[in-house]
Image (tube, rainbow, N blue to C red):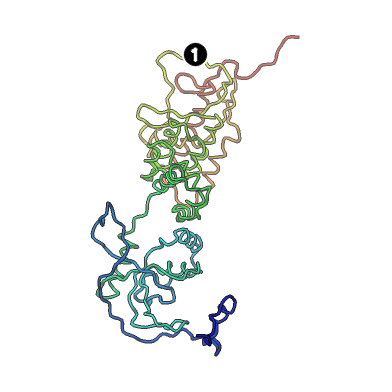
Amino acid sequence: MANDPSPATGINKILGGFQRFAGGIEARPTEVVEHEHVVSQAAVTIQATHINGELPGEVAGIDFWIPLIQLQLAPSEDLLNSRYDPKEDPDFEPYTAALKAMGDHVPALPVIPANRDVTLPDGTTKPLYLIYDQPYVYYALKDLKRTRARVYIPVVPHPGAILLSAMGHEGQMRREPSILEICRAARRLKEYYGYTVEEIAEQQAANREDKTRPSPQQVYNQINVAGLPESVQDLLHRKRILWTHARDLAEAFLGDDHLCEQCAQLASQGKRMTVEEFGFVLKRLKDKLSHLESDEAGVVHEVGLRPTLAIPAPAEKGTQVPDTTTYDRTMVARPALIQREATRFTVIVIPADKPEQVAIAPGSFKELREWLDGRRTNTTIRDTEAVLLGFLQAVRQSARTSGILNPQGTLAAPIDAVPRESTAS
């Protein structure tokens, strides 16, 4: 009809949409009221993954996205980590970053209807749900300013069943991967799937040995450790050597499989070598001050290398210098342990033309002083014998390298041990 108004267009159409707010806007506060909720099951149509046009199997369960405003933590008596406080958790920040990197694949939280409704700011009323496990996920989602959480509703007789399941999850059902498995996974992710070390570091937990936060450098070290020979990796997996042993070894000799195997065997045999001791061995090997040898029993020994300072007396064929100094059967320490302790010392022997004048350089006592100064608790007689006799054995090995031991293994004056002044006029 001619009197009908023409439809609004352009800016008039846009502004006309606000006419319903001409009387003002009422902001309603969030309100929680008691309301009974009945849990039931009914058929629903959803999108599910099919393989060759068929479901892979029977549907086991389903998760839901629920706004965070409809979620609250369960009462503390039914929540395993009820005292968890993000402000007191030093690993909360990296955990939140890892959760952020997961996107929508965040862990699903078990929830049960609270038999209460919550009135949202827009005036709608929705059921309220209580979270019965993993409160740290809830806190992390809030910290990330997420608006929803992934949840599932377990069919249980009471909340105690969820509490028992949570205890099993954190206790009997929890199996953390070994540090070797972490290393191999890091290498696979980097070299095969093309992830960066930064992306891998975001998903890793704190180091289990020293509790340091993961860093790109640590992931790089893990990738190197995964490149060590299988026998060395096996020693790490069985905890015969520590992560720090393997890390330092990979940093020093990655690519030399034979030397890596010898070093790992040296660190693991008998009483496991300390990280500090192992570091000294690696340094001496890198500086060409020693090398490793395996005896007939498969025991690895470090043998010092020193420039020959004198011409030793010729040894008779078939004679051999005794390897380890012992005192018959009166000691607790065994020769293999003494020989291993000898590797901690770097001894420099100063030749002389008389056996009683052969000397030891002052710096040779450094490692022995450090060991003595480190005694803060009772030290077993076996360890005392092994270290002290190990030092003497290191002296003998250095003397043998310098040509000062005779075929019987005792000190003897070498030929031209010290330069003599010329008598020529």
Count of labels in the image: 1
Judged from this view, the residue extending furthest toward the front is 2
Residue 183: % across, % down? 43, 46
Judged from this view, the residue extending furthest toward the right is 425
Residue closest to the eye, 197 or 306: 197
Residue 85: % across, % down? 47, 70
Image quadrant containing the C terminus: top right
Q: Please determine whether, in this image, residue 282 is positioned above or below residue 404.
A: below
Residue closest to the eye, 159 or 27: 27
Residue shown at 41%/62% (left/top)? 106
Q: Secondary structure at mark 1?
A: loop
Q: Please determine whether, in this image, residue 106 is positioned above or below residue 259.
A: below
Residue closest to the eye, 303 or 6: 6
Q: Please determine whether, in this image, residue 65 is positioned above or below residue 123.
A: above
Crowding near the residue tagged with mark 1, few <14, some 14–19, many ≥20 C-alpha atoms within 10 Å:
few
Decide if residue 113 is on the left or right side of residue 138.
left
Q: Which residue is mark 1?
A: 314
Residue 276: % across, % down? 51, 43
Residue shown at 46%/53% (left/top)? 207
Q: Where on the picture, by quarter, is residue 320?
A: top left
Q: Please determine whether, in this image, residue 293 is positioned above or below residue 30.
A: above
Residue shown at 46%/29% (left/top)? 292
Decide if residue 231 is on the left or right side of residue 202.
left
